[in-house]
Amino acid sequence: MIKRLTALLAALTLTAAACGGTDGASNAAIGPDGKVDLSKVTLRIGDQKGASIQALLAAAGQLGGTQYKISWSLFTSGPPILEAINAGAVDFGAVGNTPPVFAAAARSRIVIVGATEQRLDGQAVVVPAGSPLRSPTELRGRKVAVAKGSSAHYHLLTVLQKNELSFKDIQPQFLQPADALAALTERRVDAWAVWEPYTAQAEHQAKARVLADGNGYTNGYGFQVTSRKALDDRARRAALADFLNRYRRAQLWVNGHQKEWAALWSKETGLPVPVAELAVRRRLARIIKIDDAVVTEEQRVADAFSAAGVLPGRVRFADYFDRRFNDSVQ
C-alpha cells in the first residue's frame, strides 16, 4: 500500500498543482468579514469507471448552478480513489463497503461522511458459460478473479467462509474489472467476484452465470468519502456539504427514472442498453444515515479481513465516520 501511495503521489503532483492547494483555496475563499466565497473553491471529485457520478448528476439536473468549480478525475475502482483522497489530490469519492476498511488499515486520513444501501442482486460471483461449477463449495482450488480491497473482495470472503472455505483454498487473481472480464471470457479464470455494471456485462458478453449473489452474504452499503483535511477547511467543507446533497438527490432521482438513466448511462459507458437497464435495477439505492448499526456492520467487515489474515491487526473503524451530515438525510 505504501509503495502504491508513493507512486500515486508522484503521478498526481501535477494534477494537484493544477487544481490548486487546499490551503491556498481556503485562504482566498474566506473574506475579511469571515464569509465564504465558494466561487474561489475548486472541489476535486474522484469518479469511478462504470459508476459515472458526473453523468448521473448531470442527468438528474444536479450538476449545474454550483457556486464552486468542480474538477473530475477517473479511477478504475474504489481503492485508488481513496489513495488519491489520502494523498490530497481528490476531495470526494463514492466507493463500496470494503475500500474504506483497507484504507483505514493503512492509516489513511479518510473520513466517511455519507452512506447509501443498494440491492445485493448485482454483487455476484460469476462463472463463464459452460462452467461445471454449480455451488460455491466447488471453488476449492479454482482461480477466482477479484479486485483487491473492493466490495467484491469482501463478498468473496463471506461466500468462502459460509461454505467452509478460505482464501487459502482458492487461487485469488487480483485483477481490475476490465482485465478480469477478459480473463473470464478467455477462461483463464474459473470465476469472478464483481459488482454492477460488470455483473450484467459478464452475463451479456461472456454468457456468465451467477454462482452466488450478495443476498445472505454481504451488505449493500456504499460510502461517500472525503479527507480530514478537507473537512477542516471551512470553505471546502461548505462545498462538500452542497455536493453531497446533490449526490443524494441524484441517487434518489434514479429510483424514479430507471429507463431514462439507463439510456443515458449506456451512451456514457458504451454498455448495451439491456445491460445498463439490468445494472440500474440491481443498483437501486436508498440514502441512509450513518448510525451505530452501520458502524457495527462495517466493523464486522474489518474484523473479517483481520481474522482471515488479509489485514494486519484490528482496525477501529468507528474512528473513520463523521455524522455531521446526517441531518440532510430525508
Image: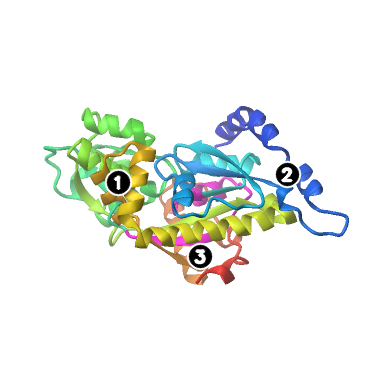
Q: Is residue 96 magenta?
A: yes
Q: Is residue 310 left or right of residue 9?
A: left
Which residues, given as a range, are shown in magenta?
94-119
Residue that badge 2 annotates = 22
Residue 54, compared with residue 328, is above or below; it is above
Residue that badge 3 annotates = 295
- Indicate the quadrant where residue 146 lies: top left
Callout 2: SS: helix
Residue 310, compared with residue 299, is above or below; it is above
Report how many numbered discs are placed on residues in the image: 3
Alpha-carbon span between mark 1 and mark 3: 31 Å
Earlier in the chain: of badge 1 and badge 3, it is 1
Residue that badge 1 annotates = 276
Mark 1 or 3: in front is: 1
Mark 1 or 2: in front is: 1
- Residue 137 seen in the current view: yes
The kind of residue tagged 3 is Val
Residue 7 percent coordinates (x, y): 59, 29
Alpha-carbon span between mark 1 and mark 2: 37 Å
**Quarter of the N terminus within the rendering:** top right
**Which residue is drawn at the image coordinates 28% and 29% (left, top)?**
182
Q: Is residue 215 left or right of residue 128?
A: right
Callout 1 environment at 10 Å: few (<14), some (14 to 19), or many (20+)? many
**Which residue is drawn at the image coordinates 44% and 44% (left, top)?**
52
Callout 3: SS: helix
Q: Is residue 329 magenta?
A: no
**Which residue is drawn at the image coordinates 23% and 52% (left, top)?**
212
- Residue 300 seen in the current view: no
Mark carried by residue 111: none
Callout 1: SS: helix
The kind of residue tagged 2 is Thr
Mark 2 or 3: in front is: 2
